[in-house]
Amino acid sequence: MKYTPPKPQDLERLKQELKLSSAAMADLFGVQGGRQWRKYTGGETPREISPHILFFAMARLELDDTTIKRVLDRMRRAGASIDLAPGGEQEP
């Protein structure tokens, strides 16, 4: 697979388009908190976002709730434990 990550300014533009805080972007992308998210958008040497993290966030933006639930159920059947709810509350 060939992959070129978005530039930090692309990720910052997405954040502005979505009107989300750094903490909310971290939640969307499945990373630990706003501080972690900001490592992808700034600093002296910003981190490149991996394709699986970017795919996860874009899937959450584009897929309907039924499809997301189906994917999560498939992950659970494969042995994963996953909870996307903020703060760890159980999702149905």
Image: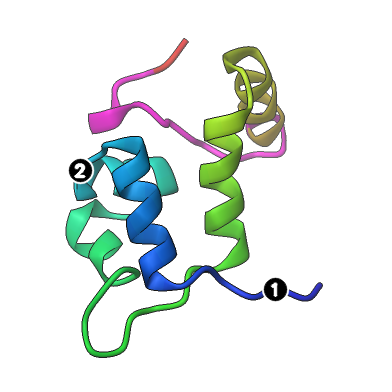
Residue 63 percent coordinates (x, y): 63, 26
What residue appears at the point 36 percent right and 55 percent down from the top-left corner? Answer: 13
Check disc 2 and give the amino acid type: Ser
In the foreground, 91 or 36: 36
Is disc 1 placed on a helix, strand or loop? loop
Relative to 50, is 15 on the left or the right?
A: left
Where does the image place residue 1, in percent across and percent down from the top left? 81, 72
Q: Is residue 69 above or below residue 26?
A: above
Q: Give the number of marks.
A: 2
Examine the rendered structure and indicate whether residue 55 appears above or below residue 36.
above
Q: Which quadrant of the figure has residue 34?
A: bottom left
Q: Which residue is mark 2?
A: 21
User: Image quarter for residue 66?
Assistant: top right
Q: Looking at the image, is mark 2 or mark 1 earlier in the sequence?
A: 1
Q: Residues within 10 Å of mark 1 (few under 14, many from 20)?
A: few
The residue to which callout 1 is attached is 3
Residue at the (61%, 58%) spot, across then down? 52
In the displayed structure, does residue 87 sit left or right of residue 2?
Answer: left
Query: In the image, is 74 to the left or to the right of 35?
Result: right
> Is residue 81 in sight in this rendering?
yes
Q: Residues within 10 Å of mark 2 (few under 14, many from 20)?
A: few
Distance (Cα) linking label 2 and label 1: 26 Å
| Residue found 57% across the figure and 16% down from its top | 65
- Residues in magenta, as a range: 76-90
Percent position of residue 28, x then y: 39, 41
Q: Main secondary structure of the magenta part?
A: loop
Is there CB contact under 8 Å for labels 2 and 1?
no
